[in-house]
């Protein structure tokens, strides 16, 4: 079923806005906080984990980008799955994408509480999540261009901070290594200090290839958010030029920032001295004596989490709006303000996200609440990527039947699609069998979630027939 109503969203977003909405919605807790546990599992080899996951996400983003360039519509993936695959895949894609960003929003709000505890260790996490929940939803009630400008500056701060950190690290490592005791690129492949005799801390692969493989599901969490390029399509000026440029630039820039920052951090301070729950970006600068840099980074990381949560609100409201246009959500969710803000869709997402406040009240240890939410986010991200690559296969088959050439073709189709699916299934197997991850229940929950959505789909069809 195609969209039955014309979108009321306003096309006001430029390449600058799209890139920084996407960067702002991606660079957050998955990198700044979850990386600590990934390093603990894989050691320096986590750098390869980010590189390999980056290749996967670039392939998937090119597939989504090809579809978005041809049809820049609200609801993005849900629209393509619905049109080229079938009603239920479209229904599943939309509601799954929505629940991803509800849970990512919950994870980011929980992370904000964790970051504030760096300064205020006794501050109760539920109070922090409640404050930032209210603040960010107020921002998103404004017009889309106002939101985009705010998100642009949030992202600018993150990028400048990460570049400054990389340049500072290079200065220390190459020009003035005496400034930080033990700072050397050798930290990437050998143990130093008190751990020099301990073989478990030696080598680039201290836990072998198994450690690298095990860390992939955690790494994936850091790349969730790049699909925001697709969500912005319906509000993009000149999408046929802007979307291809934005996708090519944003993926390469994020991958560079991820890999370069980890190389620098793990060279400045040996990974074996970190804790799995630490934010390496803050703790490493704290440990090497750069207290003010650590304080500043913690503040910037806090704004990064705020930025990602803001992106979640934007994404969720537009996803639900797109589902309503497809008649896969109640008609009331089609309503927008004169500025093009889908208020009912925004409020629905906010109601469910608010559950993070009681979650943190009953689980005052932020790491427990965060791990629960993150593990379910990873499962839904994997399902989302599967839906993108399969929908793209269906899309391409239809275009080939019509002898229609697309403006932004995905490279190596269909082999890149099949390779993406194999990689995704491999990650699911890792999650199911790895004792370190403890995600077996989440893998089992994935087909249950699909069945729940299918039940909702059937109920919605019965109601429409009456």
Image (tube, helix red, strand yellow):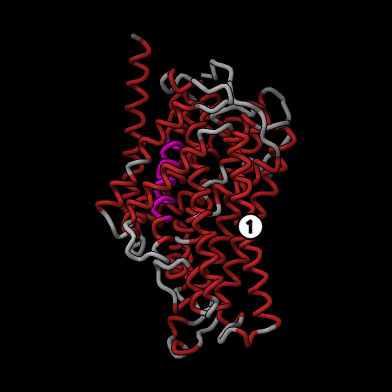
Residue 354 showing in the rendered view: yes
Residue 220 showing in the rendered view: no
Residue occupying the far top of the picture = 466
Q: Secondary structure at mark 1?
A: helix
User: Residue at position x 51%, y 68% from top?
Assistant: 295
List x then y, in percent, for residue 466.
33, 9
Most frequent secondary structure within the magenta stretch: helix
Figure disc tally: 1
Q: Is residue 192 above or below residue 119?
A: below
List x then y, in percent, for residue 46.
52, 67
List x then y, in percent, for residue 309.
48, 46
Q: Nearer the viewer, residue 452 or 18?
A: 18
Q: Is residue 52 above or below residue 354?
A: below
Q: Nearer the viewer, residue 148 or 20?
A: 148
Chain part drawn in magenta: 96-112
List x then y, in percent, for residue 452.
32, 33
Q: Is residue 236 left or right of residue 1?
A: right
Residue occupying the far left of the picture = 362
Q: Determine which residue is flagged by label 1.
A: 159
Q: Is residue 221 magenta?
A: no
Q: Is residue 219 left or right of residue 253?
A: left
Q: Is residue 331 above or below residue 266?
A: above
Badge 1: residue crowd in 10 Å (few <14, some 14–19, many ≥20): many
Q: Is residue 234 left or right of residue 274?
A: right
């Amino acid at each position: 079923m195609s969209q039955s109503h014309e979108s009321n969203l306003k096309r006001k977003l430029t390449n600058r806005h799209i890139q920084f909405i996407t960067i702002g919605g991606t660079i957050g807790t998955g990198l700044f906080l979850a990386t600590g546990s990934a390093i603990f599992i894989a050691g320096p080899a986590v750098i390869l984990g980010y590189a390999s996951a980056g290749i996967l996400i670039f392939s998937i983003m090119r597939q989504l980008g090809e579809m978005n360039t041809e049809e820049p519509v609200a609801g993005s993936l849900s629209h393509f799955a619905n049109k080229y695959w079938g009603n239920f895949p479209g229904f599943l894609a939309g509601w799954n994408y929505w629940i991803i960003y509800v849970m990512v929003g919950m994870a980011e709000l929980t992370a904000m509480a964790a970051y504030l505890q760096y300064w205020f260790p006794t501050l109760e996490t539920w109070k922090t999540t409640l404050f930032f929940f209210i603040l960010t939803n107020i921002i998103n009630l404004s017009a889309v261009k106002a939101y985009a400008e705010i998100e642009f500056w949030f992202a600018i701060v993150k990028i400048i901070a990460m570049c400054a950190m990389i340049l500072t690290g290079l200065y220390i490592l190459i020009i003035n290594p005496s400034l930080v005791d033990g700072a050397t690129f050798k930290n990437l492949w050998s143990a130093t200090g008190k751990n020099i005799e301990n073989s478990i801390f030696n080598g680039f692969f201290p836990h072998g290839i198994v450690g690298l493989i095990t860390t992939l599901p955690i790494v994936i969490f850091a790349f969730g958010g790049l699909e925001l390029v697709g969500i912005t399509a319906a509000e993009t000026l000149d999408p046929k030029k802007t979307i291809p440029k934005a996708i090519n630039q944003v993926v390469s820039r994020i991958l560079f920032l991820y890999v370069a920052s980890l190389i620098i951090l793990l060279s400045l301070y040996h990974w074996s001295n970190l804790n799995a729950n630490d934010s390496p970006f803050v703790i490493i600068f704290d440990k090497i004596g750069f207290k003010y840099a650590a304080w500043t980074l913690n503040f910037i990381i806090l704004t990064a989490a705020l930025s990602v949560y803001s992106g979640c609100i934007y994404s969720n409201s537009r996803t639900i709006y797109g589902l309503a246009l497809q008649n896969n959500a109640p008609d009331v969710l089609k309503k927008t303000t004169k500025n093009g803000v889908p208020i009912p869709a925004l409020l629905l997402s906010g109601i469910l996200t608010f559950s993070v406040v009681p979650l943190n009240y009953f689980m005052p240890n932020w790491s427990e609440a965060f791990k629960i939410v993150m593990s379910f986010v990873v499962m839904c991200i994997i399902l989302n990527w599967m839906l993108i690559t399969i929908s793209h296969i269906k899309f391409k088959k239809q275009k080939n039947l019509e002898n229609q050439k697309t403006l932004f073709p995905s490279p190596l189709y269909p082999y890149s699609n099949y390779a993406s699916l194999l990689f995704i299934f491999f990650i699911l197997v890792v999650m199911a069998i790895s004792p370190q991850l403890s995600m077996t229940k989440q893998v089992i929950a994935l087909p249950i979630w699909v069945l729940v959505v299918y039940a909702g789909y059937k109920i919605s069809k019965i109601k429409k027939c009456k």
